[in-house]
């Protein structure tokens, strides 16, 4: 019985393949791409459990079990990187969403067409340019000798400050740069959601004599709630991954700032590029992948409970 | 556009692309009842909105003004009093330095423009073809392949194994291919394309099938012409990915190629003293004569200029990228 069912299934599989061979061929380049660049490197994860050296290769290097992870935990490095990554992401998510929603509400109040167009053009611009330019901007504003900020301080009679050696100030700078870069573009989603609100709701609110604040509180904010919850959950799912380009172009190899600015991805990049340290970097990367995967799954499970239609799978 | 990938998929399906100024075309402008009087609170909110939106827009534009002003400033003035909002001692010296020995910057432009044009064309072809196949309800493997592509965003080998694989096993270290190939597509762009595809009426495909057209012909002759907005949006993100690329170059190219992609060239100019000197090599300058501060700023302007000029024309596709967004895979 089972055998016939299996052959029947195999027969129908062959039939599906032959009936859709053109569509399969059309997917082939993309599938090959992801095999080569995403699936093929996966076995390399084994490096995390070895004392890797080039000569013996990935599977020839001595197996040392979990010792790489033990080292990372005992040195406190893993904790520092996790703390920084998670705290930065939380700040980005919380402050970012509050500002995006506020900006969207205010953009909705703006009636002059050209004012709206010009201001939106300017607000999306930072998201459009490369992160390298953001590094240039930071240099222009913050460097000790000629930076615009120190120029301003000197012009008003103050003493210039060495911003690139003050670790404590950088969380604020990084969050500010992140907000500068992404608030405008991120507000589009909320703005579109506000535009999608049924206009009769606003009219009804006005007839009932709702104040401006009440209109926001009881009409706009409740309508944004589904968008907000879903965006929030997915953002929390990505809390272990960073914003590598931004951090690297602001901080780079400035060791004086690591304690407050080093995140998982900058640390892994530095290990690979400057130190050729493949064992520790693979271990950290694996830790990030596993936790990230679990968090996305958890977020998706929550989204599914909130609204099935928006779940990823 | 690495960061756009982190935008949550799913949530965006509920919003449609609505721009208020496009509405009056469909509706008479005065449809909103004029009987509703604005209260003092409404006016206050509106006033505050204008002020805050203006300030934020200025805040976003300010750094660009700083860079451009600095690039036109004289080095000695900058060394004396620092960067400011207005050019100090207006001069074109920094630009003269760049264009006196333009070999480096022209080489970088050729590399970046070639990669952008080729990569966008090839990437767009593969992505639209895949998006078309995954949109077909009669394609029995659509869910399997969708998941196969989507899974790569959930779990990855991480940087170190990928780096070893690409540079050692594939042997692409020092090759432009190591930069060119990985940027051809992302799962996010394939899903975006598939979502856009929903605007193509399914009957069109069925009518093609009834007429006996093959799947590839249906794609080229019937679907593609209807996908222009999708192609424009996905193409923009691909082009932006190539134009703004510095990361893969820093991993795989290093200093092994003579002409670096534009943004990586800029990255080096900002971060290493040697690169700055080499960027104007051949002009026989004494190192101390180099206007290093203003030269950095002028290099940034030269490397960013074209994309800023293109920006107003492509902005609407940039916006539809986030509003159409990515729905489940």
Image (cartoon, coloured by chain):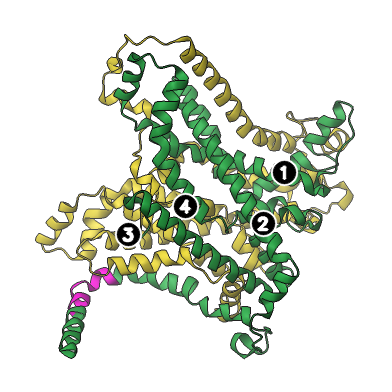
Instruction: Say if labels 3 and 2 share a chain.
Output: no
Q: Position of residue A73 (x, y in %)?
A: 70, 70
Q: Give the colour chain A carries in the figure.
A: green
Q: CA distance from mark 1 to mark 3?
A: 39 Å
Magenta stretch: give its range: A15-24
Pair 2/4: label in front: 2
Q: CA distance from mark 1 to mark 2?
A: 24 Å
Q: CA distance from mark 2 to mark 4?
A: 19 Å
Instruction: Say if labels 1 and 2 share a chain.
Output: yes
The crowd level at tag 4 (other Cα within 10 Å; few <14, some 14-19, many 20+) is many
Q: Position of residue A134 (x, y in %)?
A: 66, 45
Judge whether residue A21 is colored magenta. yes
Indicate the quadrant where residue B193 lies: bottom left
**Residue corresponding to mark 2:** A83
Q: Position of residue B91 (x, y in %)?
A: 77, 34
* Circle 1 SS class: helix
Per the rendering, the mark at residue A234 is 4
Per the rendering, the mark at residue A138 is 1
Is A25 placed above or below B78 here? below
Q: CA distance from mark 3 to mark 2?
A: 39 Å
The crowd level at tag 3 (other Cα within 10 Å; few <14, some 14-19, many 20+) is many
Q: Position of residue A142 (x, y in %)?
A: 77, 41
Mark 4 falls within which chain? A
Q: Main secondary structure of the magenta part?
A: helix
Towards the viewer: B167 or A116: A116
* Circle 4 SS class: helix
Chain coloured yellow here: B
């Amino acid at each position: 019985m089972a055998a016939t069912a299996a052959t029947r299934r195999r027969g129908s599989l062959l039939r599906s393949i032959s009936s859709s061979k053109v569509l399969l061929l059309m997917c082939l380049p993309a599938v090959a791409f992801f095999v080569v660049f995403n699936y093929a490197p996966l076995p390399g994860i084994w490096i995390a459990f070895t004392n890797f050296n080039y000569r013996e290769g990935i599977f020839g290097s001595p197996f040392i079990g979990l010792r790489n992870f033990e080292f990372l935990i005992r040195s406190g490095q893993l904790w520092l990187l996790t703390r920084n990554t998670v705290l930065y992401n939380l700040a980005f998510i919380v402050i970012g969403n509050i500002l995006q929603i506020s900006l969207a509400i205010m953009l909705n109040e703006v009636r002059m067409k050209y004012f709206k167009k010009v201001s939106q053009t300017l607000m999306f611009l930072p998201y459009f340019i490369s992160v390298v330019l953001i590094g240039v901007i930071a240099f222009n504003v913050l460097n000790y000798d000629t930076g615009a900020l120190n120029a301003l301080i000197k012009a008003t009679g103050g003493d210039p400050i060495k911003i690139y050696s003050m670790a404590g100030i950088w969380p604020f700078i990084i969050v500010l740069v992140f907000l500068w870069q992404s608030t405008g573009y991120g507000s589009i989603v909320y703005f579109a959601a506000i535009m999608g609100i049924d206009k009769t709701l606003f009219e009804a609110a006005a007839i009932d004599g709702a104040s401006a604040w009440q209109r926001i509180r009881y009409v706009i904010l409740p309508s944004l709630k589904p968008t907000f919850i879903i965006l929030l959950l997915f953002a929390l799912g990505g809390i272990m991954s960073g914003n590598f380009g931004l951090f690297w172009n602001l901080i780079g190899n400035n060791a004086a700032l690591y304690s407050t600015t080093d995140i998982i991805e900058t640390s892994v990049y530095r290990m690979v590029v400057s130190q050729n340290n493949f064992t520790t970097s693979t271990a950290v990367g694996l830790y990030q992948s596993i936790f990230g995967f679990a968090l996305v799954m958890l977020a998706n499970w929550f989204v599914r409970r909130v609204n099935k239609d928006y779940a990823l799978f | 556009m690495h960061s756009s990938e982190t935008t949550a998929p799913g949530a965006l399906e509920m919003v449609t692309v609505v721009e208020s100024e496009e509405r009056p075309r469909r509706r008479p402008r005065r449809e909103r009842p004029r009987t509703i009087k604005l209260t003092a609170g409404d006016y206050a909110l509106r006033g505050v909105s204008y002020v805050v939106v203006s300030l934020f827009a200025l805040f976003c534009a300010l750094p660009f003004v700083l860079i451009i002003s600095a690039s036109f400033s004289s080095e000695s003035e900058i060394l004396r009093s620092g960067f400011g909002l207005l050019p100090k001692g207006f001069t074109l010296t920094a630009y003269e330095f760049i264009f006196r020995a333009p070999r480096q910057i022209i080489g970088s432009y050729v590399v970046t423009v070639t990669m952008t044009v080729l990569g966008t064309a090839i990437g767009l072809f593969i992505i639209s073809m895949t998006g078309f196949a995954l949109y077909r309800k009669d394609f029995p493997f659509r869910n399997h392949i969708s998941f196969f592509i989507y899974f790569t965003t959930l779990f990855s080998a991480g940087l170190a194994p990928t780096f070893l694989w690409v540079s050692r096993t594939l042997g692409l270290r020092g090759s432009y291919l190591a930069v060119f190939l990985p940027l051809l597509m992302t799962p996010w762009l394939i899903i975006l394309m598939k979502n856009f595809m929903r605007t193509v009426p399914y009957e069109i495909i069925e009518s093609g099938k009834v007429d006996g057209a093959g799947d590839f012909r249906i794609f080229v002759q019937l679907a593609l012409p209807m996908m222009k907005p999708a192609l424009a949006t996905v193409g923009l993100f691909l082009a932006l990915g190539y134009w703004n690329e510095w990361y893969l170059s820093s991993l795989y190219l290093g200093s092994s190629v003579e002409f670096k992609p534009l943004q990586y060239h800029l990255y080096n100019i900002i971060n290493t003293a040697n690169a700055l000197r080499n960027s104007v090599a051949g002009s026989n300058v004494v190192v101390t004569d180099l206007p290093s501060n203003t030269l950095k700023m002028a290099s940034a302007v030269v490397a960013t200029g074209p994309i800023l000029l293109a920006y107003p024309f492509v902005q609407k596709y940039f916006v539809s990228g986030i509003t159409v967004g990515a729905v489940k895979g």
